[in-house]
Image (spheres, grey):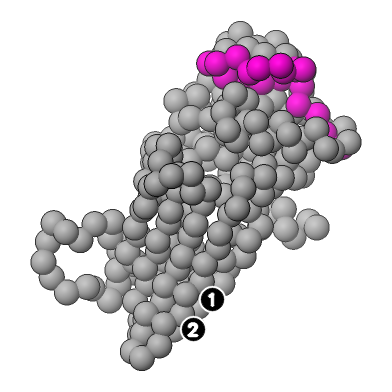
Amino acid sequence: MTNIIMTGCSGKMGASIIAAAANRNDLKITAGVDLVAPKNADFIYAPSFSELECDADVIVDFSNPAVLDSMLAYAAAHKMPVVICTTGYSDEQKKQINEASKQIPIFYSGNMSLGINLIIELAKRAAAVFGEGFDIEIVEQHHNQKLDAPSGTALMIADAVSQVRTDAEYVYDRHSYRKKRGKNEIGIHSVRGGNIVGEHEVIFAGQDEILTISHSARSKTVFAVGALNAAVFLKGKEPGMYNMSDLLQSV
């Protein structure tokens, strides 16, 4: 049994994870941390980590970058692994996560979907096959309540492609200057509207042919299931950074 502390337990993703956990017998949500108290929760609740007293195996975080300091401090003090699913971190915070992984196991991914992680591998492969003869554009769409742009997933895709196109330059907006598109550019575009769960499209545009790789998430359940699988995977691991590739290889 894997006992989980859920950060962001009162949010939409928190509700999805709680619902997904209720259908499993290999794990349990034992505590939740959020500024807002969850309704009808059957687990320990605290508004912050400084007020939490709970023995658990793993922290699953779907919250806000502002929580990072207190969460990592709590995890380090209790030698507790953390599955970080929150996006929108600054470069400094990403360094902080890497430093923390020297003391505790951390599973860090901008997207917990199996399909998205397959797209990332396919995009990387396509970039290697096409070379500089194809222009690359990434378009992501999310609901109108999402705070960060571009999405962490769009950046994951771009980072994977840039492992092949090592001279890549990320371009987020072209309206402010007038010049031809550079061959080394990776365009990244964000759409926010309605209740779109998550749409990602990678476009490889060449001469006379276009390849498009796309993924559509129809509900938050796919991310919840991935996060819970990561929690079970991370229990008992040695300190270090882990990601979806590590999880997939263990299956």
Q: Are marks 1 and 2 in contact (CB under 8 Å)?
A: yes
Residue type at mark 2: give it.
Val
Residue under the point 37% across and 72% down: 136
Q: In the rendered view of the protein, which quadrant contains the C terminus? A: bottom right
Residue under the point 48% across and 30% down: 64
Mark 1, residue position:
125
Left or right, 230 with respect to 130, comes to right
Q: Nearer the viewer, residue 100 or 45?
A: 45
* Magenta residues (range): 26-43
Residue 195, how many percent across, how many down?
A: 48, 44
SS assignment for the magenta stretch, majority: loop
Q: Is residue 198 magenta?
A: no
Q: Is residue 137 visible?
A: yes
Q: Secondary structure at mark 2?
A: helix
Q: Farthest bottom residue?
A: 208
Residue 125, how many percent across, how many down?
A: 54, 76
Crowding near the residue tagged with mark 2, few <14, some 14–19, many ≥20 C-alpha atoms within 10 Å: few
Residue type at mark 1: give it.
Arg
Please tell me the numbered disc located at residue 45.
none
Residue under the point 40% across and 61% down: 139
Mark 2, residue position:
129
Residue under the point 53% across and 16% down: 35
Crowding near the residue tagged with mark 1, few <14, some 14–19, many ≥20 C-alpha atoms within 10 Å: some
Left or right, 31 with respect to 159, comes to right
Q: Secondary structure at mark 1?
A: helix
Q: Farthest front residue?
A: 194
Q: CA distance from mark 1 to mark 2?
A: 6 Å
Residue 82, how many percent across, how many down?
A: 65, 34
Left or right, 186 with respect to 70, comes to left
Q: Is 92 above or below relative to 54?
A: below
Q: Is residue 31 magenta?
A: yes
Q: Nearer the viewer, residue 148 or 4?
A: 148
